[in-house]
Image (cartoon, grey):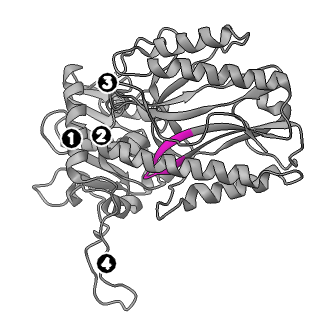
Amino acid sequence: MCAASHCQRPCGNDSPAPSSSRTGSPFLMTITDTRQSAFPAAEYSERVERLRVRASAKGFDVLVVTDPKNIFYLTGYDAYSYYVPQSMVVPVASDAPVLVLRRQDVPAALWTTHLDEDQILGYGDEYLTGNLHPMEYVAEVLKSLGFGKATIGIEFDGSSFSPRGMHVLEQALADATFADMNRLVEWVRCVKSEREIQVMHEAGRISDHAMETAFDAISLGIAESQVAARTYAALVGGLHGIYGSAPWQPYMSSGQRTNTPHLRWSDEPYRMGRPTMIELGGHRHNYAAGLSRTIFLGRPPADYRSLEGAVVEGLHAALPRLRAGNRAEDVERVWRRTIESRGFEKNYRIGYSIGISFPDTGWVERTISLAPGDRTVLNPGMTIHLMLAVWLDRIGYSLSETFVVGDGQPERLSSLPWELMVK
């Protein structure tokens, strides 16, 4: 704890703010660069307030947010540091949130968020290398804020929250009540602001650029890995001054390997008479616009053209249902009936809510699924990755892109044609 009698929080925020300077060393200088946050402070505050409204209705006193995408959404914190535990403590009342990081990552929060310096706490490496656990530090933060006996919301299935972390919290806060947040932040994330949609439009332009780059690169005899390298360069390099942030790994399979969706590239050369499925996403400020197309080297056979026709016809049938007021399952039902009339079937969902994406956690928001039984009502501002792929026993066909839900026809984030790309 701090030595000062008026401070009851754990110490650890020993690193200087980006605007600070130190004297006495020729190797240190005043840092004058501005913070690098994608959105203004008011937008992050509004997101926190919307979360608080939902949390209050659920009876929570305080939330412990551990998923890195949720922390990014609420603060803008953007560093590849979530391989160690980190948390955002959000009091449901009016107290300011607190971000708890590894001590060496505190400056990254000062660079990328609008948080005040006293809202960022750092724990030392003794919590990583000994018998201690970072959640012991988080427990002390909760106690210091008066939540030792509170009802605490936890992300039970958060991507960065472990069973040991839960056990440590329960041991350290024996008088508290823990309850699952049940993807509370993710549901707030579902409806995007105008600024978020603008960023996703930029991501969509990067997606198109990367897909066109892949199409141009694919040729007889070139290795799949070489095409993947050029595709990655396009995803990160962006276009027209719009750079890409770190993307989720593209899926790239060819030939009979297209019968399954989630394979990466290989060292094999491209061959004539074979399809290639590519699913990628341009990322802008960590917001993704998913996009899939199928490329065929040579003349496609008639039965493959029939599969293409069924998928594209299903897209045309489903799009009018992807609008505010309809339910998620309504979109899937129309698609399924359309392709079944053409002799094909797909026993998987055909889309999901998309938005923030990190390289190893992906862009799926884990809320809305365009699938039988999902009765979620679609609202304006939701962004959906419509994944209209069919994987047969020996071959597959993929067509997808990201749409913004509105009161009428959904807004496209891609300008590419929907048909098979033949080369």
Tag 4 or tag 1, which sits nearer the N-term? 4
Name the disc covering residue 193, or none. Answer: 2
3D distance between C-alphas at marks 3 and 2: 31 Å
Q: Magenta residues?
A: 282-290
Report the quarter where the C terminus lies.
Answer: top right
Name the disc covering residue 178, or none. Answer: 3
Name the disc covering residue 46, or none. Answer: 1
Q: Secondary structure at mark 4?
A: loop
**Does residue 119 sit above or below 185 in this rendering?**
below
3D distance between C-alphas at marks 4 and 2: 32 Å
3D distance between C-alphas at marks 1 and 4: 29 Å
Q: Secondary structure at mark 3?
A: strand
Mark 3 vs mark 2: give the one in front: 2
Q: Is residue 289 visible?
A: yes
Q: Secondary structure at mark 2?
A: loop
- Give, as a three-letter code, the residue at label 3: Phe
Tag 3 or tag 1, which sits nearer the N-term? 1
**Does residue 102 sit above or below 178 in this rendering?**
below
| Residue identifier under label 4 | 31
Tag 2 or tag 4, which sits nearer the N-term? 4
Q: Residues within 10 Å of mark 3 (few under 14, many from 20)?
A: many
- Give, as a three-letter code, the residue at label 1: Glu
Name the residue at 57% across, 15% down: 335
